[in-house]
């Protein structure tokens, strides 16, 4: 076997030029030698199982330990549609009679929402509903209208809460008690999840009623959202006064004539 030549190994050096890109590092390899190595990158492979967060009553129980009881959950339905009111609900659950299966209303089927709606209304210590119509939404914008609907619902409760947990990033101004905002609250708090179900079911019933009056729009199917059927009906028949939100982009950009009731 051929012998390798004796003597010191030649040094490895980093080529001259601009510094290495971010994510690269330099490690010393013996005297006078360096080697460039790539830092470990975060894997972009999907998780084998998606972690689904389910709401529980832990936030409410911590509030109870602080002396803040009753606790009301606040949520709204109908921020995105082109028509109809934004509807909010306030719910004070009975800690010993919490319905099974409470969750973010968007993760439930229509039948599941209806069943849970009946259970919440029959078992909760207090339930209240309030709405802000399309005309007021146009006047004050949808965020303020949503917060106003939640404020009204909280004030309409038959029991006065000491704490209100509101879904989202904002606490409705003018609450009758302390308020705390919870991002994705309907996936964290059972009280907020219950309010989201009540608000969604009530708004859907309202829009179904609108569909029986304005049969050409199909409100009972799309609930006022910007589906192809709804947008086509608006193009053909025009928007309905006091029902469509004329401050929303399709109407501002289209400048369509408003159909009077």
Image: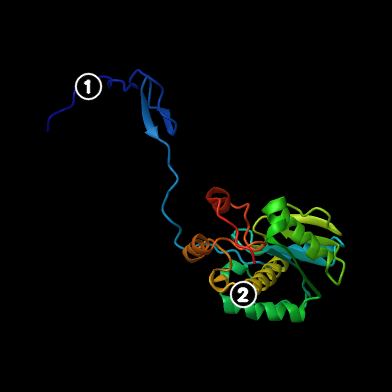
Q: Secondary structure at mark 2?
A: helix
Residue pointed to by mark 2: 213
Numbered mark located on residue 65 in the image: none
Q: Say if 248 sits above or below 53 in the image.
A: above
Left or right side of 230 for 60: right
Q: The N terminus is located in which quarter?
A: top left
Q: Is residue 134 above or below residue 101?
A: above
Q: State which quadrant residue 192 falls in.
A: bottom right
Q: Is residue 97 visible?
A: no
Can residue 130 be seen by looking at this rendering? yes
Most foreground residue, 185 or 230: 230
Q: Name which of mark 1 and mark 2 comes first in the sequence.
A: 1
Q: Secondary structure at mark 1?
A: loop
In the image: residue 22, left or right of residue 124: left
Residues at marks 1 and 2, CA–CA distance in whole angstroms:
97 Å
Dot 1 surroundings within 10 Å: few (below 14), some, or many (20 or more)?
few
* Quadrant of the image occupied by residue 117: bottom right
Mark 2: few, some, or many residues within 10 Å (few <14, many ≥20)? few
On the image, the x and y values in percent for residue 60 come to 77, 65
Residue 21 percent location from the top left of the image: 41, 29
In the rendered image, the vertical position of residue 221 relative to residue 227, given as above or below: below
- What percent of the width, then of the height, locates residue 28? 41, 26
Looking at the image, is mark 1 or mark 2 nearer the viewer? 2
The residue wearing badge 1 is: 6
Is 261 rendered above or below residue 39? below
């Amino acid at each position: 076997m051929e012998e390798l030549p004796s003597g010191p190994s030649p040094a490895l050096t980093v080529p001259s030029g601009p510094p290495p890109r971010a994510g690269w590092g330099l490690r010393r390899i013996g005297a006078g030698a360096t080697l460039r190595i790539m830092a470990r990158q975060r894997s972009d492979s999907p998780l084998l199982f998606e972690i689904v967060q389910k709401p529980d009553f832990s936030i409410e129980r911590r509030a109870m330990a602080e002396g803040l009881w009753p606790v009301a959950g606040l949520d709204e339905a109908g921020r995105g549609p082109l028509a109809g009111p934004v509807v909010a609900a306030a719910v004070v659950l009975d800690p010993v009679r919490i319905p099974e299966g409470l969750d973010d209303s968007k993760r439930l089927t229509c039948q599941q929402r209806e069943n849970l709606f009946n259970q919440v209304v029959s078992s909760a210590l207090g339930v209240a509903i309030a709405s802000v119509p399309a005309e007021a939404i146009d006047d004050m914008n949808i965020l303020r209208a949503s917060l106003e609907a939640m404020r009204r619902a909280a004030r309409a409760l038959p029991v006065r809460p000491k704490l209100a947990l509101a879904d989202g990033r904002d606490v409705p101004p003018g609450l009758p008690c302390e308020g705390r905002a919870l991002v994705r609250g309907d996936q964290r708090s059972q009280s907020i999840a219950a309010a989201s179900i009540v608000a969604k079911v009530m708004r859907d019933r309202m829009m179904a009623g609108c569909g029986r009056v304005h049969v050409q729009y199909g409100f009972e199917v799309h609930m006022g959202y910007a589906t192809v059927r709804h947008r086509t009906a608006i193009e053909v028949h025009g928007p309905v006064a006091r029902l469509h939100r004329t401050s929303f982009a399709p109407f501002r950009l289209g400048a369509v004539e408003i159909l009077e009731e």
